Amino acid sequence: MSVFTSIDMQQLTAFLKHYSIGEPEGFTGIEAGITNSNFFIDTETGRYVLTIVEEETFKDVEWFMQLLAFLHQNHIPCAKPFLSVSGNYTKPLAKKPATIVECLDGADKTAVNSDDCHAIGRVLAGFHSSCKDYSLTRIDSRGSAWRAATAEKVRSKLDTQDRNLLDQHMQADYSAVLAALPESVIHADLFKDNVLFNNNQITGIIDFYYACTGCMLYDLAITFNDWCRDDHGEIDLPLASAMLQGYQEIRPLELSEHQSWPNAVSCAALRFWLSRLHDLHFPPDALMTFTKDPAQFQNILSNQTPSIAELTNQQDVEKTS
């Protein structure tokens, strides 16, 4: 569990005066999470989730919360954010941006099945479709500039084989390829631990703090790389087929997206290989630390990616489009 910023009851009581959810009765740190500090808080009106955002500005956090409110209003399963009495979603706590959202029923799954993958494919496609005309934009904080800076920082920590793999993928111009594909607002971090289930039904997607305007196929690849592979990065074909079919039931992929699928998968793997390498070699200071293994994404980058047609057992898309 990671809590980078600790608080006490006095601080929490003062903070909650900005919201109309009652007086605090207690709070506990939430297990898991590697970027922000999250707490369950109990008040006289119920249970909520408090997040202290460690790396983003107040302006960016307000953008995330406005997006969350938009998605909630458009029936995408996610937590409702709460406005403060002054009319915005974000207030300072311990000199950092902090937010309050409803506490959703359910829990994440460490092991998923084909039904789960089909369901999240449909939810992600609905998210993308709902946000295609969303007026508020945001640049990806983990885009090409971040990749270049992080690669330079971790490169000296790698052995020769891994340095060569890193150099190979850094030289590929993924950003130019993906920039030509259809865009929307994307979640950009829709791992299994960011989706809650209750009785095998998705009750909410959480943790929107990497959301941005970006390539929808890249977002699908991020989700695919976590949900449809084992711990070694090997593809589970039934899971992969279920997710890709579920997604395309809501938003069929264009020919250009089919052709760019391997690039999207590699770019998604590179982003998370770099972030995990960074956390491994330069661990952040935290009261409780949870660091994920980068090896899964290293393995993905070392192997070829099958086409979407191969993964879904379909005919060549160029012949059927």
Image (cartoon, helix red, strand yellow):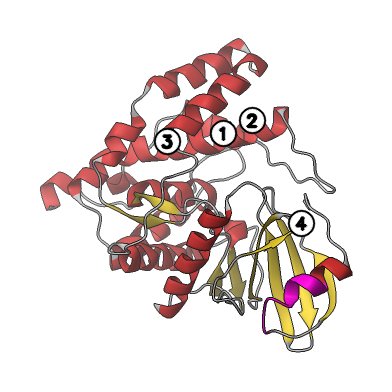
Question: Alpha carbon of mark 1 to alpha carbon of mark 2: how far?
Answer: 6 Å
Find out whether the residues at labels 1 and 2 contact each other: C-beta distance under 8 Å: yes
Is residue 16 one of those drawn in magenta? yes
Tag 2 residue: 277
Q: Label 4: few (<14), some or many (≥20) within 10 Å?
A: few
> Is residue 40 visible to the viewer in this orientation of the structure?
yes
| Nearer-N-terminus badge (3/2) | 3
Relative placement, left or right, of 215 versus 303 is: left
Mark 1 / mark 3, whichever is N-terminal: 3
Q: Residue 73 at x, y = what percent?
A: 43, 79
Separation of marks 3 and 2 at Cα, in angstroms: 15 Å
User: What separation in Å lies between label 1 and label 3 (alpha carbons)?
Assistant: 10 Å
Q: Residue at x 78, y 83 (%)?
A: 43
Q: Secondary structure at mark 4?
A: loop
Which label was assigned to residue 267? 3
- What is the three-letter code of the residue carrying label 3? Cys
Q: Say which element carries label 1.
A: helix
Closest to the camera, between mark 4 and mark 3, is 4
Residue hosting label 1: 273
Three-letter code for the amino acid on which mark 2 is drawn? Leu
